[in-house]
Structure formats: C-alpha cells, structure tokens
Image (cartoon, rainbow, N blue to C red):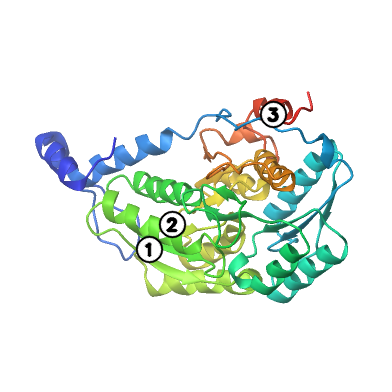
Amino acid sequence: MKISKSMVAVAAAATLVLAGCGSDSGTDGGSSEASAEGVALAEEAAAMVDEYRSVPTPDDLGDSIDISELEGERIFSIPIDSGAEFYADGEAAMAAVAEEAGVEYVTFPSDGTQTSYQQGIQQAINSGAGAILLNGPLPETLGPQIDAAREAGIPVVPLHINDMDSGVSDGLEYEAFAPFNLAARLMALDAIAHHEGVPVNALIIQSSETGPAEGMVQTMQETLDEYGPEGSKASVMNVAVPQWSTRIQDEVQSNLLRDPAINAVLPIYDNMATYAAPGIQQAAAGRDVPIFTFNGTPSILQMVADGTVAMNVAENPDWVAFVNMDTVFRAMLGEEPIEGVSGPVRVIDETNVDETGDPPRSGEGFGDEYRDAYRELWGLS
C-alpha cells in the first residue's frame, strides 16, 4: 500500500507513546532527532523493503521458442567495462548459456571508453556476428556504428541499460531491461528504515554517462521526499566509470568532511562501494554512515557480511544471463520481443547474506528453478 507523510502524521499523532520519544541520530554535526512521524515512516519503509528479502520465483517467461536453428551462430558482446567484476560475471554467465545452446559467444575487451565500444562493434561486423550485445554502452552514443550493423543484417540488442518501464531504445526492436528504479527505491527506503525516524541526509554517487543514472538518482530523491522524515535530502556526486578507482574515495571523503550531517551513502552501482568505503572510514570513522547499493557483486556481498556495506539490492547475473539470452535468441529468430523483460532482485543484508555463500558466490541465494524454466522454454529439455 502506498503511504503518504500526511497519513503517517495522523497515525503518529494518535500514538502518544511515540510522541514524546526522540533518539539521537548518532552523527556528529547532525542535531536532528527522530520524530513520531519519522519513526512511523521508517517502520513503513522497513516493511516495504522486507517484501524483497525472500528468494524470487520465475514468473511468466513468455511464449516458447525453438533455438535449435541458431546452433553455430556467433554472438558478440560489448560490456561497458570488461574488467569490472559485475560485468565479468555477467559475461561469463551469458557465455555459459550460449554454449549450452550451441552458440559461439565472444566478449570484446572494452575498457569503458567510447573508442573501445566503436572498435568492438566494427570487429563484430567484420566477424559476421549473428547479433551484437551492448552490455552497458549507450546505444544513443553509437548511432553510426549501430546503423552499420543493421545494414549488415545484424540485430543490436542493448542489455541492462534502461529501466524495465522505459521502453525500447529509439530505432531498435529488442532490449533486455533491468529493475534499476526499483533498486534505487529500495536503497532509499532502507536508508530511511535504518535511521529509525531521523532525517536521512544522503550522498548519492552516480555515473551520468550510464543509462540508468538519471532515473535512479531521481527515484532516490523522490523516495526520500515522499517517505523520508521531514528534513531528509540528498546531494549527488558524479564520477565517470573510468575514474571510479581514482576519484570516488577522495570525493566521498571531501563530501563527508564538508557536510558532517551526511548519514548515508548510496552508490548506484556496488563496485563504487569498494572506493566509497575507505573514504567513509577516513572522514567519518566514528559516525553511522552506512552504504546502500545495487548489483549483488560477490566482493560487495562480502562487504555486507563484514558489516562494511549495510545493504545490497542484488541481481543474479546467471538469471539475468538467461533473460538477456532469451531476448537475443528472439531477436536472431525474428520472434516477438517481450515487453519490459527483466531479471528479479533480492535485498541482501545482515539477515540473509549467509544464503549467498561463504564466501559469497555469484548468483547464490536465488534458487535454481529459473534455469530449468528457460531450458524448457527454449526446447532444450
């Protein structure tokens, strides 16, 4: 059920035991205390987050397709950065699915630069690929290259770039989406729940050149405005993908020193947390400044287990690989695309991180029903 601050205010006013309560925010430089309305909002936020802590199950996967005629074809993938752990895991998972289908899978060694994406598309065309995947690079920045691929009869399929409610990228027919805005909403809600009625002063870390960034930032801001205690707000720092390792730590540290009331850090991608955490440690070691993030990368789930990261809205790269490859197979076969297709998420925190393995492993904690469901969908079982 959707709540509003006015609804919560009425309920809080009626709860006299809460009306006289206040709790220190636990942050130096921040004098805000929990209000009755804030406590009620935090409890509602916690309940909404809790709905996503359990293992997801596969929903309707669409019409069955016969992929036997694709055997021997080649799929060429261009990740946003082939060295980033999340993308490396995803590429390996898609390669495994392709192998099971008898399809060759090639990952281009991109480095996060536009030049590498352009080179990758040209190499795919030259190699006679049956499909080109944009696993992160924005199609609107690669118009001439995409046009050249389509002229060669090669479908170009963006993956994990746009939110599941955004619609297919202009000029393209097939796309596999991701639950970016849902993840952003859950991150902000959990930050609200964590602070138990104290206003949330969040630092959002984004990379504006990536497709989901604008929507995720807007969703977090709107969620804090709608569900956060009075006085909640967010500031935004922007760091380009190739500069994460050199700039995030210093800029997080600078922001925390400049604004001692910051009490939550929300990186839109969890690899950012690798660099944000030491910045928090250096600038705010004695303050409660938890990290809430998105992706489900094993090394960051280990940071959840260690208590360095408070929460990760996790995807399963293996499940996402099946979603992505189903979309690509349909494109190669000329079948109807599935509107808004996306993998699920699961909120991982201290309550369930042990289900992801010790140490955490990619895709662990999501069950395995989806694998058999897709194999049956494709005629492989």
Q: Nearer the viewer, mark 1 or mark 3?
A: 3
Q: Which amino acid does label 2 sit on?
A: Val
Q: Which of 51 and 356 is in front in this view?
A: 51
Q: Earlier in the sequence, mark 1 or mark 3?
A: 1
Circle 2 sits on which residue? 289
Instruction: Name the secondary structure under disc 2.
Output: loop
- Which image quadrant: the C terminus? top right
Q: Earlier in the sequence, mark 3 or mark 2?
A: 2
Circle 1 sits on which residue? 262
Instruction: Name the secondary structure under disc 3.
Output: helix
Q: Distance between the residues labelled 1 and 3?
A: 48 Å
Q: Distance between the residues labelled 1 and 2?
A: 7 Å
Left or right of residue 106, residue 294 in this image: left
Identify the residue at horizontal 69%, vertical 39% (top origin).
322
The answer to whether 77 is drawn above or below residue 326 in the figure is below
Q: Earlier in the sequence, mark 1 or mark 2?
A: 1
Residue 265 spot, x, y in % from top left: 46, 59
Left or right of residue 41, residue 281 in this image: right
Q: Distance between the residues labelled 3 and 2?
A: 45 Å
Mark 1–mark 2 contact, CB under 8 Å?
A: yes
Residue 122 spot, x, y in % from top left: 80, 70
Identify the residue at horizontal 53%, vertical 46% (top origin).
312
Circle 3 sits on which residue? 377
Q: Which amino acid does label 3 sit on?
A: Leu
Q: Can residue 263 be seen in this view?
A: no
